[in-house]
Image (spheres, rainbow, N blue to C red):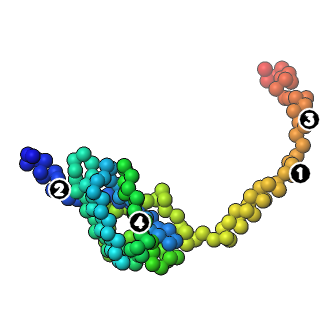
Amino acid sequence: MNEDTLLKTVEMQPAAAKWYDRCDSVFVDFCVEDSKDVKIHFKKSKFEFNCVSGTDTIKQENSVDLFGEIDSKESKYRRTDRSVLCCLRKVEAGKSWPRLTKEKSKCNWLSVDFNNWKDWEEDSDVDLSSVDKFSEMMNTMGGDDIPDLDGAEEEHESADSDDEKMPDDLE
């Protein structure tokens, strides 16, 4: 093994990740392709992620002090060829997390997954009922208020001003 290969296997860096919040869980998706030797340790207020990724065998390592507490026994992860998705089960279901980390400082490897983000706190039956009312209103709007256009074309043809002869003064 040459020195370059040895350096590549020892190189460590945090894995890029996206996160989103749900009522009873928080999801963290680590964007690591072709991951091997995935190790995740869930603790009460922290979790650690380790793997070797890609053909360059780069060691990825993340340690996260969490905003809230999780149930370490109910938290799970799933590995695919493109990522590792972690489902962190909240101890306090129904309480939203404004951020993933305990500290307010920005982590350069972490971003919000806006494709999966949902403001679940604001979801309610009231919102659904207003959609139903709007839908019902659109369905009840019928032809009663729409004027009858039958024969309008005939009227328009007979009153067509373009076919009239222009006075001699204006030609």
- Determine the CA span between mark 1 and mark 4: 58 Å
**106 is higher (above) or lower (below) than 171:** below
Label 3 sits on a secondary structure element that is: loop
Q: From the viewer's perspective, is residue 65 above or below residue 54?
A: below
Question: Which label lies toward us, 4 or 3?
Answer: 4
Residue under pointer 2: 11
On the rendered structure, is 8 left or right of 65?
A: left
Q: Residue at x 74, y 58 (%)?
A: 135
Give the mark nearer the N terminus: 3 vs 2: 2
Q: Which residue is mark 1?
A: 144
Q: Amino acid at mark 1?
A: Asp
Q: Quadrant of the C terminus?
A: top right
Crowdedness of circle 1 by 10 Å Cα count: few (<14), some, many (20+)?
few
Mark found first going from the N terminus, 1 or 4: 4
Residue 52 image offset from top left, x and y in percent: 25, 55
- Separation of disc 2 and disc 1 at Cα? 73 Å
- Tag of residue 151: 3
In the foreground, 74 or 164: 74
- Residue 129: quarter of image: bottom right
Could you tell which of marks 2 and 1 lies nearer the N-terminus? 2
Q: Which residue is mark 4?
A: 76
Label 1 or label 3, whichever comes before in sequence order:
1
Residue at 88% across, 40% down: 149
